Amino acid sequence: MIIKSCVQVLEKEISDLEHRLQDAKARLALVSGQETAGDSYLSLPQDVVPLLPNHALFLLSDSALPLGSFAYSSGLESYLAHNKPLPPKVTPVASFHRFLKLSITSIASTSIPYVLAAYRQSGDLETLDNDMDASTPCVVAQRASIAQGRALIGVWERAFRGTYASGPFLAGVAAAKAVTAIEAFSDALKSCVDTADALGPRGHFAPLWGIVCLAMGMDAHQTAYVFMLNHAKALLSAAVRASVMGPYQAQAVLASKGLQDIIIERIDREWDTPVEDAGQVVPPLDLWVGRHELLYSRIFNS
Amino acid sequence: MPIKSPFEACIAKPGQGNVILSLLPPSNPTLTTLTYKYPLKLLTRAPHYVPQSSALSCPVSRPVHLHLLTYGGGLLPGDHIDVSIKLEPQTRMVVTTPQGSTKIFKTEPNTSVKGRRAPGRVLSDKSRQTLNVAVGREAALCYLPDPAVPYKDSRYEQVQTFTIDSTTKDSQRSSLCMLDWVTQGRTSRGENWDFHLWRGKNEIWTADESGKKKLLLRDSLILDEELDEVCLENEDETLNRSGLIRERTRPHGIVGTLILYGPVFESLASFMMDRFTSLPRIGARNWSSSAPAAVESSPNFDSKVTFTAARVRAGFVLVKFGASDFETAKDWLGNIFREEGTVLNEFGEEALCCL
């Protein structure tokens, strides 16, 4: 932890120094008046990274990515039903904020180790998928994870593979390995007979997310961050449809510093967690998700 | 050649224990190995209870009881208990903790720790417990211990690994019933999830003929106050962070998991599933205009305990529950086990001594 904070301090210092250097150069340019027309936009944000690698990032963070995530509330609907009526001093929005925080913490501790493990060791995909299935304690959560995972494989095969599996967009050796691993996994998934006792591949979302992101050339931080952000987006979208808050309020929460901070904090915390140590940190969440099946009326699948 | 001392301890490390239960012909369960070392103590008892009928078709052997004891009924920081148990085919074992709940103690560190600005503001050592059980073909384990009670500021970690025989099918499978629950601490002293760390992991593995291991089930619970040395030096941050576990477990005062597997516990597993699926719907309303308003059903055990049961995979039934306090959860579980009767029938009344 001490080393980690040291690194953070140094990184901050470096970026600060770079910023000051840039600033000084810009001022020098202004004072000396040598440079003319071309540099007048220097004060605007710089193109730090070329846009090309970010294209995959934009695709995967798009809320129109057809994974069907909108059909799942990750226990929000059940949480609302279990906490009804609210105590007099608690507003629905405050209650939702509690859930948002718990849900993000929990998804980070249960899924981020798998996302990163699949990203780092793409060859272990089948084992990771099996272990994720073994670690998911209720059928409701399992269904949600498998449906989204299989949808992601579908999107990869039907849409992204054509561009990213070969040619100029293939991002290096690791990505090529990831492409082969997805291919092999997808074949195993299709040939597996879905009987109750068979323990074949299931297609869980978290490990597949890691490996598809690798195949599309994203870096590990982006992979984890977009995974968490997409989860937050799905929760907020569910909150809007469950009439907890309005769409503008939901966007405000999504944009807020609080949400960014908690996502980054949770990713940092789970960055080096091995999959064996992934686990539930919010035990009531398992109960809420599992009891979604008991709701009298439902608008979501989880 | 040096002569081996007859007084030499057979186990090197403190806290280690080793048990092997075999079935000697014709049908005589015998502990062929039983060793342990301080601070662990293992006691066994072979009650004369013989199951009259069983879900298994093979000849039924008498269950053997194993009591897990520690000196003082709990674990001090730095204690490491490591028990490994092997049940050979067709044997049965009941494991209980007759000392009541497993207390996870916390001792104040020595005041004279060198190089510390504020003595007493260091994290205490973790206490750890490891349990490894191999359950053979047609063997059955019933492990219903008391809950763990982690005291304020304690740190604890436990890993319970069960290996079952998967080379056989259906009625020849191993059977397993295990309970793992943790409370908020000593409620009588006002403790409410005030410990620093409780990490519990239950894994069930299987190995096929070639010896390749496969994970069947992993249930992992991490209750972490997320303190580290840096936070401890900074009082304000500690104050800010306190209550993290309480916030994450609200509204429960005890949480637990029950795992059921195998032919012996099949009817108990179905009973739990039925109990769950027949719970009243949440938010149900009576829409008919003529019928009288729904009668408020009398509060029963099911309404006081929040639980879910799911048939997850490979025939496992996983029950998770949360309740406001230990007594409620205990009564609920005891009531279910006694009403259903499998455990009483197959292992005798003493198997439920903790409930």
Image (cartoon, helix red, strand yellow):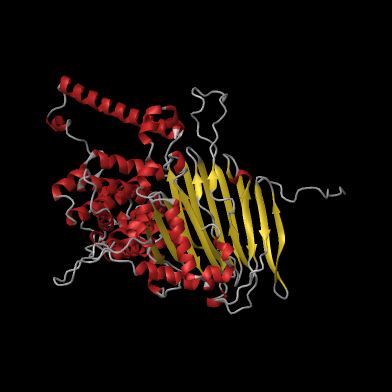
Q: In the visual, does B127 lie left or right of A37?
A: right
Q: Which residue is found at the position 41% from the left and 44% from the top?
A: A271
Q: Is residue A220 visible?
A: no
The location of residue B349, given as percent across then percent down, is 57, 65
The location of residue B75, given as percent across then percent down, is 58, 43
Q: Nearer the viewer, residue A26 or A222?
A: A222
Q: Which residue is found at the position 57% from the left and 49% from the top?
A: B129
The location of residue A302, given as percent across then percent down, is 29, 61
Q: In the visual, does B45 lie left or right of B230?
A: right
Q: Which residue is found at the position 21% from the left and 36% from the top?
A: A46
Q: Which residue is found at the position 19% from the left and 68% from the top?
A: B286
Q: Is residue B346 visible?
A: yes
Q: Is residue B316 above or below residue B243?
A: below
Q: In the visual, does A279 lie left or right of B47?
A: left
The location of residue B241, given as percent across then percent down, is 37, 36
Q: Nearer the viewer, residue A237 or A239?
A: A239
Q: In the visual, does A260 lie left or right of B57?
A: left
Q: Nearer the viewer, residue B229 or B148?
A: B148
Residue lying at the far top in this picture: please name it. A31
Q: Nearer the viewer, residue A132 or B239?
A: B239
Q: Is residue A288 above or below residue A34?
A: below
Residue lying at the far left in this picture: please name it. A37
